[in-house]
């Protein structure tokens, strides 16, 4: 299986002097935690979308087992994760694979639990909370609970 990891961001809002994916959490970068979690379930083909300080990320991953393909988001400062994922679309054969946002530091146990979730039936037309679609998947991924209901937008 192939995994796409979005790691183009600078992390300026966090006051960082490096890529957000390089934040150290418990002795390992967020990026390394993501790769280790994917590898623990058999993923060995990684597509890393890079942008800010991309050379630093490539050096950080040098020597790790697996196949690494780098996709460059030259517009990382003016775009978002959706654009980064769009740039990697050719690496998602038939829409199958896994994608990780850049700022998730998760345990391998939580990640394995997430991968066992089943998507809603195609005929339902909508995602159920706690399934692998959009915000629900991200929230379930992070803390095993359904996504919160967002407040109505004020006009």
Image (cartoon, rainbow, N blue to C red):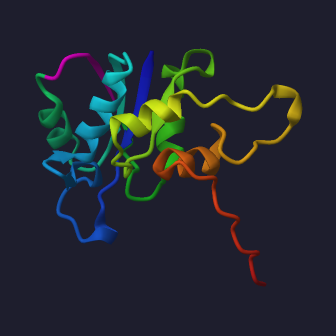
Query: As drawn, is 27 to the left or to the right of 38?
Result: left
Q: Position of residue 111 (x, y in %)?
A: 43, 35
Q: Quadrant of the N terminus?
A: top left
Residue 67, quarter of the rendered image: top left
**Residue 57 position (above or below residue 129):** above
**Residue drawn at 54 percent across, 37 percent down:** 86
Q: Residue at x 82, y 27 (%)?
A: 122
Q: Among all residues in the image, which is located at the extreme bottom?
A: 155
- Judge by depth and name the residue closer to the eye, 139 or 12: 139
Q: Is residue 142 left or right of residue 37?
A: right
User: Is residue 59 among the parts visible in the rendering?
Assistant: yes
Asked if the magenta segment contains residue 67, the reply would be yes
Judge by depth and name the residue closer to the eye, 119 or 99.
Answer: 119
Looking at the image, which residue is at 47% across and 54% down?
79
Q: Is residue 56 above or below residue 91?
A: below
The vertical placement of 109 against 13, above or below, is above
Q: Is residue 88 visible?
A: no
Q: Position of residue 57 (x, y in %)?
A: 20, 40
Horizontally, residue 83 falls left or right of residue 129, namely: left
Q: Quadrant of the C terminus?
A: bottom right
| Residue 151 rendering spot, x and y as whole percentages | 71, 74
Quarter of the image for residue 33 reads top left
Left or right: 94 in relation to 59? right
Residue drawn at 21 percent across, 65 percent down = 16
Report the predominant secondary structure element of the magenta stretch.
Answer: strand
Looking at the rendering, the stretch of residues picked out in magenta corresponds to 64-71
């Amino acid at each position: 299986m192939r995994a796409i990891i979005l790691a183009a961001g600078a992390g300026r809002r966090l006051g960082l002097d490096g890529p957000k994916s390089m934040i150290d959490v418990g002795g390992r970068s967020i990026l390394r935690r993501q790769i280790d979690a994917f590898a623990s379930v058999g993923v060995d083909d990684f597509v890393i979308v890079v942008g800010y300080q991309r050379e630093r990320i490539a050096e950080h991953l040098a020597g790790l087992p697996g196949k690494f393909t780098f996709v460059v988001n030259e517009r990382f400062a003016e775009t978002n994760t959706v654009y980064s994922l769009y740039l990697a679309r050719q690496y998602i054969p038939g829409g199958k694979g896994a994608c990780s946002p850049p700022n998730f530091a998760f345990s391998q146990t939580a990640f394995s639990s997430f991968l066992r979730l089943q998507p809603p039936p195609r005929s339902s037309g909508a995602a159920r909370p706690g399934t692998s679609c959009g915000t629900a998947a991200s929230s379930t991924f992070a803390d095993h609970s359904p996504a919160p209901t967002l407040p109505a937008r004020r006009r």
